[in-house]
Image (spheres, helix red, strand yellow):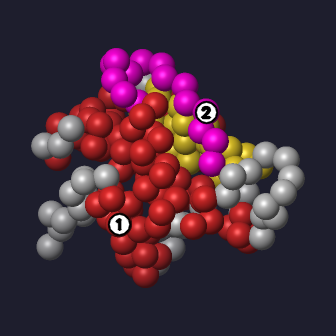
Amino acid sequence: MKLEIEIEHWPDGEWESITGGAAKATRDVEPALAHARLETSVLFTSDEQVHVLNREWRERDKPTNVLSFPMLDRDRLRALEPEGPPEMLGDIALAYETCAREAEEKGISLEAHATHLIVHGLLHLAGHDHVDSDAQAEEMEALEIAALAKLGIADPYGDRT
């Protein structure tokens, strides 16, 4: 998968490397993402910009930590032939202020939290979801936990009872 990364309103950091690592770990747990023809854009931006996107595309008038905009449905992704032109999997946008606040509240690094949110976003682009049923949520969370473990990042859901 080819990644296009744009960084606005985030502090200096290894965001390209973090994104690449998150993508590789996610491909390892979700083989549909390992397709060489896939392209994904990841935007590191501000709460203000994510707020605008959330309002325009999801009719939610507030910022959120991560947004995913899939461009291939799950069936089309799984049926993708090896040969052919690039296929845009979708876009991911991360909101700096929300991500930083959440990381601080969780007592984890911004890098670890951003990695989790990139994994989460990529799984959404691959057709996974967590809103329709507990079973879907558990399946998606298990994939997130497995991908993050490959990167040495602790289970982000481990504090639930």
Q: Is residue 88 left or right of residue 68?
A: right
Task: Kindly identify the amino acid type of the residue bearing the numbered disc 2.
Answer: Glu
x, y percentage for residue 118? 44, 46
Residue 71 in view in this figure = no
Q: Is residue 148 above or below residue 105?
A: below
Residue lying furthest right: 84
x, y percentage for residue 27? 52, 59
x, y percentage for residue 137? 41, 72
Write the residue at 86% across / 53% down.
84
Q: Which mark is residue 146?
A: 1
Task: Kindly identify the amino acid type of the residue bearing the numbered disc 1.
Answer: Ala
Q: Is residue 26 above or below residue 48?
A: below
| Label 1 element class | helix
x, y percentage for residue 45? 47, 26
Residue 39 in view in this figure = yes
Write down the region rendered in magenta: 1-15
**Residue 161 is inside the magenta segment:** no
Seen from the viewer's position, the closer of residues 80 and 52 is 80
Query: Is the residue under label 2 in contact with that under label 1 (CB below 8 Å)?
Result: no
Q: Quadrant of the C terminus?
A: bottom left
Q: Which is nearer the N-term, disc 1 or disc 2? A: 2
Callout 2 crowding tier (Cα within 10 Å): few <14, some 14–19, many ≥20: few
**Residue 2 is inside the magenta segment:** yes
| Label 2 element class | strand
Residue lying furthest bottom: 135
Callout 1 crowding tier (Cα within 10 Å): few <14, some 14–19, many ≥20: some
Seen from the viewer's position, the closer of residues 141 and 67 is 141
Write the residue at 63% across / 48% down.
1
Q: CA distance from mark 1 to mark 2?
A: 24 Å
Write the residue at 51% across / 73% down.
132
Write the residue at 36% across / 45% down.
115
The residue singled out by tag 2 in the image is: 4
